[in-house]
Amino acid sequence: MTTTSDRVVRIALVADGPPRAIGTNSGVSKNLLEALAARPDVEIVGEIDAHVRGVSRALVRLVSFRPSAWRWRRTVSWGTAKPRFRSLLRDLKISTRRTEIDLVIHVRNFYFPTQVPYAAFIDTTMHLRRMHMPEVRIRDADYERLIDIEQNYFTHATHVFTVSDYVRKDLIESYGVDPQSVSVVGAGLRKDFVVRPKPVPQLNMILFVGRDFDRKGGWDLVQAFAIVRERFPEATLEIVGSTPNISAPGVVIHGDVQDIDELSKIYSRAAVFSLPAHFEPFGLVVLEALASGIPCVVTDVGALREIIETSGGGVVVEPRSIPELARALEELLADADLRAKLGLAGRNYARQSWEDVAGRIMSAIVAA
């Protein structure tokens, strides 16, 4: 790409909320923004919140009106009004910037193209979401329109950055994006995450971390844990991020743990981490578990297999297979040497930082 400086690229970052808020885009925008801002070849000239709320959301609801309440809700969620208003918010905020922008980087989500050169940082696509989440019922007509918007957005981007190879392949095969304009840059651990030494001996504690309990397979894990308890009556299942209505022996519910120090203590106590998701684009919590030296049991969805096979830090099972999930958990709980081996491999793999991710992004931008 062409810039007005041989050294500094002036970047505006667009997110689905305040870019520096830890809750925006699961903390991805904050970590990426700070990693880019720390580089000498980057000047952050815009932090753009394009989340549709307030008056914008009211307008989306108005233009999406349908006589049926159920169709109205579906049209608000999956119609074209939301991405259009999201894009208008972005364009309005870009137009108010006095400093010239060389590149706009969109974190997750999708938009209509903008006249300023732009790049996308994504972890999934609408095609993958619909293919792997049958419970998300989108009308064929709405789906086709959203695919068209995405395809237009991706093909006009200066570059598309993905967290995994499976998304890169989908962009090329399903959207026709030029392979030269797609780069796998991965994701990193957040800076404030503390890796603690594991207590000895390890407890038979299985850990789940996730806010969307249904989509991330929480109920499957609860059922598998009941089987595990028959062989390991002292085992516990600790749930972080969600507050499901569960009253079962050995299940401990922490809810949303905002204190990163407390969260790292919970990780350090775990013998096994499990994310038996039905759909998961990447799984940043898996990186946290691997960095903590915990062997992981995950399902073969999204980038989870890619992470586990590359790291050698865990076991992959079929989604929604409760007996297979239970067997994998039992095997790890029964074998301390295997847990130690997988834990060490995972810890070595999870050393990647967001600074590494930012470096790959800038190398691709400068080369374009």
Image (cartoon, helix red, strand yellow):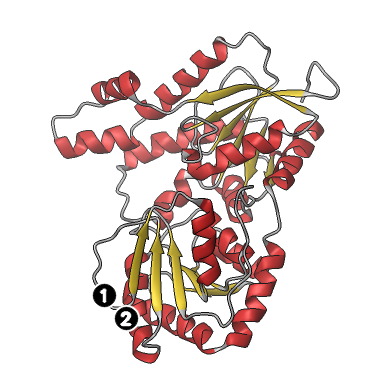
Q: In which quadrant is the C terminus drawn?
A: top right
The answer to whether residue 282 shows anywhere in this view is no
The image shows residue 20 at horizontal and vertical percentages of 55, 33
* Relative depth, front residue between 241 and 172: 241
Identify whether 308 is placed above or below 180. below
Q: Amino acid at mark 2?
A: Ala
Q: What is the secondary structure assignment of the residue under circle 1?
A: loop
* Relative depth, front residue between 275 and 77: 275
Q: Which quadrant of the structure image shows residue 291?
A: bottom right
Contact, mark 2 vs mark 1 (Cβ under 8 Å): yes
Density class for disc 1 (Cα within 10 Å; few <14, some 14-19, many ≥20) is few
Identified at 49% across, 62% down, the residue is 301
The image shows residue 336 at horizontal and vertical percentages of 58, 86
Q: Which mark is residue 248?
A: 1
Identify whether 45 is placed above or below 83. above
How far apart are the alpha carbons under marks 2 and 1? 9 Å
